Image (cartoon, helix red, strand yellow):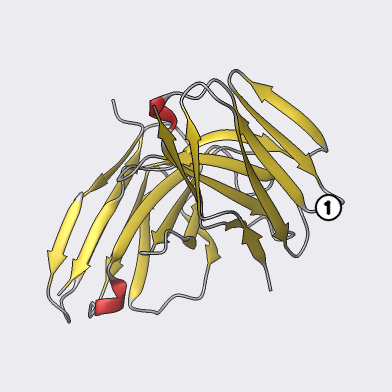
Amino acid sequence: DTAVSQTPKYLVTQMGNDKSIKCEQNLGHDTMYWYKQDSKKFLKIMFSYNNKELIINETVPNRFSPKSPDKAHLNLHINSLELGDSAVYFCASSQDPPGGGETQYFGPGTRLLVL
Amino acid sequence: GQNIDQPTEMTATEGAIVQINCTYQTSGFNGLFWYQQHAGEAPTFLSYNVLDGLEEKGRFSSFLSRSKGYSYLLLKELQMKDSASYLCAVKDSNYQLIWGAGTKLIIKP
């Protein structure tokens, strides 16, 4: 009964490949997020969806495309992977849109290594 | 630009008290969060401050001074399991969370 789950947990792939990471939350939350945590441990917001609609879209390469089929799922597709994409990608969810003290619940992370 | 500053690493002794500081310069302020992240795991929520003062929650307390752009996380009666990174994050005027790089806390017996 994991609250926020991500698959796969580890992903090793070659440069130039296309890959997807899936995220699901069973908390009934309305808002979901994708973060990238690099080797320096900075967490950077990439995207946020509220009720399947995009509400935050930070400056990320357009090789990254999120997709939210329903409010419980937010997937991340990455085209033409580059070495610099190697990082840990965290999915998170919260009850409300970013507007106050809502707590974000994080998934276990997907460790992506591009060779 | 927006900036969150925390010490990179701190060491403390089991049973002791440690204070982790966070200073911020952001475009607006809509709350400050502290998260704990164990190595190889996801961040988990610890505390939220939006008004000045001290919020206490068991062994952990968090303090905020908005005029000084300053917060601290106070951990009492340290346990070995408290060894982790502690992330400070501020919600700016656009309600986006700006994250610090985290403070790695090492607890020694």
Mark 1, chain letter?
A: B
- Regarding mark 1 in the picture, which secondary structure is present there? loop
From the top left corner, tell me how far across and down residue B37 is, in percent: 42, 42
Instruction: Please state if A47 lies on the left or on the right of B93 as rendered.
Output: left
Callout count: 1
From the top left corner, tell me how far across and down residue B63 is, in percent: 73, 36
In this view, B30 is above or below B75:
below
Observer-nearest residue: B36 or B12? Answer: B12
Q: Residue furthest right?
A: B67
- Residue displayed at 20% across by 49% down: A9
Residue A12 in view in this figure: yes
Mark 1 residue type: Lys
Observer-nearest residue: A22 or B45? Answer: B45
User: In the picture, which quadrant includes the N terminus of chain A?
Assistant: top left
Instruction: Please state if B86 lies on the left or on the right of B40 as rendered.
Output: right
Instruction: Please state if B13 lies on the left or on the right of A72 as rendered.
Output: right
Around disc 1, counting alpha carbons within 10 Å, would you say few (fewer than 14), some (14 to 19), or many (20 or more)? few
User: In the picture, which quadrant includes the C terminus of chain A?
Assistant: bottom left
Observer-nearest residue: B76 or A26? Answer: B76
Residue A76 in view in this figure: no
From the top left corner, tell me how far across and down residue A4 is, in percent: 35, 38
Residue A64: image quadrant is bottom left
Question: Which residue carries the number 1 mark?
Answer: B68
- Residue displayed at 35% across by 64% down: A39
From the top left corner, tell me how far across and down residue A7 is, in percent: 22, 48
Instruction: Please state if A32 lies on the left or on the right of B64 as rendered.
Output: left
- Residue displayed at 20% across by 66% down: A113
In this view, A114 is above or below B71:
below
In this view, B53 is above or below A110:
above
